[in-house]
Image (cartoon, coloured by chain):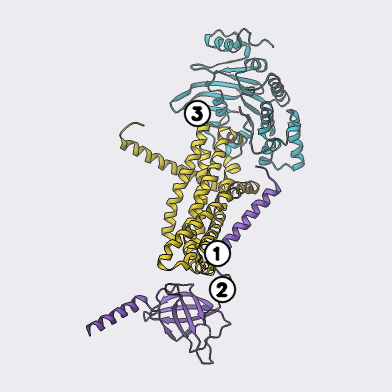
Chain colours: A purple, B cyan, C yellow
């Protein structure tokens, strides 16, 4: 065990490469982002959020503009979702929010469809038009029920 | 027991599992003198040194160094007690991953804030004292048996302790190196007034160097100046002293 | 040991528990020594070299092999469902969540854990540690803490390198040999793996395993019997204890974290 400058260099290299591997796994593969767009807080209330989780992305036209920061039940027993959105994005007052699934079996996210009004939603604004998550079980259940009905007829 | 003794063992009993090493050991080592701790293999010579150093605790009895029972000390106080003691081990116990210089410098680096230049000078001085000036950069694995023992000695005295415990300082050495170590120990004792306790079965050297001897035995321990032991007619003592150097009268110079 | 088998079992159980307690106490000692100055960075660097750098060949070699096997096995299974384009996700998730930290832990135990135990055990046998004590130098502080800390620090790095090499292995087999689309491999990998749920858990496991191996190896070495048989026993005990402990803790962490 000799102290030497080469050994220090090698250890430093090992640590650097190891950290690089960790960084790759965290950011590139794991999707950790350090530049989370955010600042503008909006609310949207849904009847059914399905598998939506906090930190799920908020997307407009397929582009991520923010994330879900909180999910709570409100007084009417509906799910109130708090969205943290990039303030540079202008969200029209009559925009609608929907919960969609990425792919058939993927994670759920909130998609905002822009409205037509010129008036924009300010901080703490609420998106009025929402459509909840589509539950796969209900769809299949409905389909099967429909088949049964056909058979009965 | 009087204050002339630097170390006193009082009614010490110690067993390792089922094996009893001491039943009721009483002995002492005088201050400022060279003492030899004698006994057959397994008689507990190394154990006595470890008791003095606090590496082992007795089942019963007291081990007094400067009047203080080291067996009852807690870590911090034990640490302080050890600063005044230097110990060499049979195989040298040098850290095999560090050079000779670094080994000897270790106590200074750990316990003092000595500036580097002064530290280097002190270490070099000690290495020169033991005749290892050229070996500073070698690793223990590259040293001969004699060199290892000398390096260990340098390390044990670098902090200028009051007492030096040596476990088999002469074992595995050729006659030339035995003489060297003997001369070094004598010089340390004379120059620094160091109390030296050496556990050894090198009887010739023990008799020529020591002014006090302790002979450990199964049932009893014999202590006294060398000439008393040489004249002791107890069969056990005679057998031990005679068997080790057949045909020679202990105490006679080589 | 005499007495009925029940006696012996009871005796064993008590001994194992006492052993765990002693290990925990030793762990406390090492922890206290770690935070007491001096930091001994030089020794830490040396230890990271011995534990980390010298383990690289076996970790990355095994990583490549494991990745290739995963690629093969994964493909064989997925192709039955027509889902072979998701190979990246399957290989990646298996590696990141389980195989990376666990296999790295076991490999490092065998290579570096046993080496550390043997090294410290040899120091006990040659009275080097007693020599330190007699110089009022705490052997745990001078010798042990750097080795334990190095194990803790190196494990996540080695685990990450294992995973990346294995992903490459999976890629080589899946994409180059079996014809999975390279882009699909990477994109399914990236969309399936989540930082919080997967990567953080993986990192946590690696850190815990590093701490465990560091503790077990230094404990066994430090308390080994001062003979060559004792050192050998300490080395094998390290590998056995550390391996079992890794697998048990893997279960706990997976159950508690991976929801």
Where residue B77 sits, quadrant-wise, is: top right
A27 or C5: nearer the viewer: A27
Please give left or right for residue B60 compared with residue B38 in the image.
Answer: left
Residue C249 image offset from top left, x and y in percent: 44, 52
The chain carrying label 1 is: A
Q: Which residue is the site of mark 1? A: A26
Q: Secondary structure at mark 2?
A: loop
Residue at the spot x=34%, y=39% of the render? Answer: C10
Residue C188 image offset from top left, x and y in percent: 49, 68
Same chain for the residues under marks 3 and 2 in the image:
no
Visible in this render: residue B108?
yes
Front label number (3 vs 2): 2
Q: Residues within 10 Å of mark 1 (few under 14, many from 20)?
A: many
Q: Which residue is the site of mark 2? A: A36
Please give left or right for residue A103 compared with residue B250 in the image.
Answer: left
Visible in this render: residue B125?
no
CA separation in Å, label 3 and label 2 = 67 Å
The chain carrying label 3 is: B
Q: Residues within 10 Å of mark 2 (few under 14, many from 20)?
A: some
Q: Which residue is the site of mark 3? A: B58
Q: Secondary structure at mark 1?
A: helix
Same chain for the residues under marks 1 and 3 in the image:
no
CA separation in Å, label 1 and label 2 = 15 Å
Q: Secondary structure at mark 3?
A: loop
The chain carrying label 2 is: A
C148 or C102: nearer the viewer: C102
Q: Quadrant of the N terminus of chain C?
A: top left
Residue B13 image offset from top left, x and y in percent: 48, 25
């Amino acid at each position: 065990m000799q102290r030497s400058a080469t050994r220090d260099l090698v250890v430093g290299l090992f640590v650097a490469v190891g950290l690089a591997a960790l960084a790759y796994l965290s950011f590139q593969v794991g999707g950790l982002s350090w530049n989370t767009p955010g600042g503008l807080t909006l609310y949207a209330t849904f009847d059914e959020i399905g598998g939506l989780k906090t930190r799920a992305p908020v997307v407009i036209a397929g582009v991520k503009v923010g994330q879900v920061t909180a999910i709570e039940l409100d007084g009417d027993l509906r799910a109130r979702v708090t969205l943290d959105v990039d303030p540079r994005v202008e969200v029209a007052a009559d925009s609608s929010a929907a919960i969609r699934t990425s792919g058939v079996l993927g994670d759920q996210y909130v998609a905002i469809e822009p409205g037509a009004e010129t008036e924009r939603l300010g901080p703490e604004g609420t998106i009025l038009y929402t459509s909840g998550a589509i539950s796969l079980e209900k769809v299949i259940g409905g389909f099967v029920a429909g088949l049964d009905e056909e058979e009965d007829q | 027991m009087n204050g002339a003794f630097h170390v006193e063992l009082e009614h010490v009993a110690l067993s390792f599992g089922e094996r009893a090493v001491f039943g009721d050991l009483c002995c002492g080592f005088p201050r400022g003198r060279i003492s030899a701790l004698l006994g057959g293999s397994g008689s507990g010579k190394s154990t006595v040194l470890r008791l003095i150093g606090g590496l082992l605790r007795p089942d019963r009895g007291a081990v007094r160094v400067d009047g203080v029972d080291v067996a009852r000390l807690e870590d911090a106080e034990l640490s302080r007690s050890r600063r005044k003691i230097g110990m060499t081990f049979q195989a040298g116990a040098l850290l095999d991953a560090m050079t000779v210089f670094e080994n000897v410098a270790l106590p200074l680096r750990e316990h003092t804030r000595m500036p580097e230049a002064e530290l280097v000078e002190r270490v070099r001085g000690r290495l020169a004292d033991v005749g290892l000036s050229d070996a500073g950069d070698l690793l223990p694995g590259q040293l001969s048996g004699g060199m290892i023992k000398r390096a260990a000695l340098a390390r044990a005295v670098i902090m200028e302790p009051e007492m030096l415990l040596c476990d088999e300082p002469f074992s595995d050495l050729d006659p030339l190196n035995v003489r060297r170590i003997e001369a070094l120990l004598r010089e340390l004792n004379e120059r620094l007034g160091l109390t030296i306790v050496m556990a050894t079965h090198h009887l010739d050297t023990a008799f020529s160097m020591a002014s006090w001897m302790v002979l450990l035995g199964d049932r009893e321990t014999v202590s006294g100046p060398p000439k008393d032991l040489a004249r002791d007619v107890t069969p056990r003592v005679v057998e031990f002293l005679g068997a080790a150097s057949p045909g020679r009268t202990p105490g006679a110079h080589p | 040991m005499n007495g009925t088998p029940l006696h012996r079992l009871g005796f064993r159980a008590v001994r194992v528990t006492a052993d765990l307690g002693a290990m925990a106490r030793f762990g406390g000692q090492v922890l206290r020594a770690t935070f007491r100055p001096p930091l001994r960075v030089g020794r830490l660097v040396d230890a990271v070299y011995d534990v980390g750098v010298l383990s690289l060949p076996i970790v990355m070699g095994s990583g490549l092999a494991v990745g290739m096997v995963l690629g093969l096995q994964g493909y064989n299974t997925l192709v039955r469902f027509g889902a072979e384009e998701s190979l990246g996700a399957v290989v990646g998730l298996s590696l990141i969540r389980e195989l990376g930290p666990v296999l790295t832990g076991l490999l490092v135990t065998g290579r570096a854990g046993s080496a550390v135990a043997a090294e410290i055990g040899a120091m006990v046998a040659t009275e080097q540690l007693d020599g330190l004590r007699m110089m009022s130098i705490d052997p745990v502080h001078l010798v042990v803490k750097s080795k334990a800390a190095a194990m803790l620090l190196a494990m996540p790095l080695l685990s990450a390198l294992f995973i990346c090499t294995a992903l490459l292995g999976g890629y080589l087999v899946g994409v180059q040999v079996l014809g999975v689309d390279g882009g699909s491999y990477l994109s399914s990998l990236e969309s399936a793996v989540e930082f919080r749920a997967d990567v953080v858990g993986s990192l946590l496991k690696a850190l815990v395993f590093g701490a465990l191996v560091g503790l077990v190896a230094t404990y066994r070495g430090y308390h080994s019997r001062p003979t060559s048989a004792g050192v050998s026993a300490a080395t094998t005990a390290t590998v056995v204890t550390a391996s079992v402990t890794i697998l048990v803790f893997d279960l706990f962490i997976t159950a508690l974290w991976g929801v």
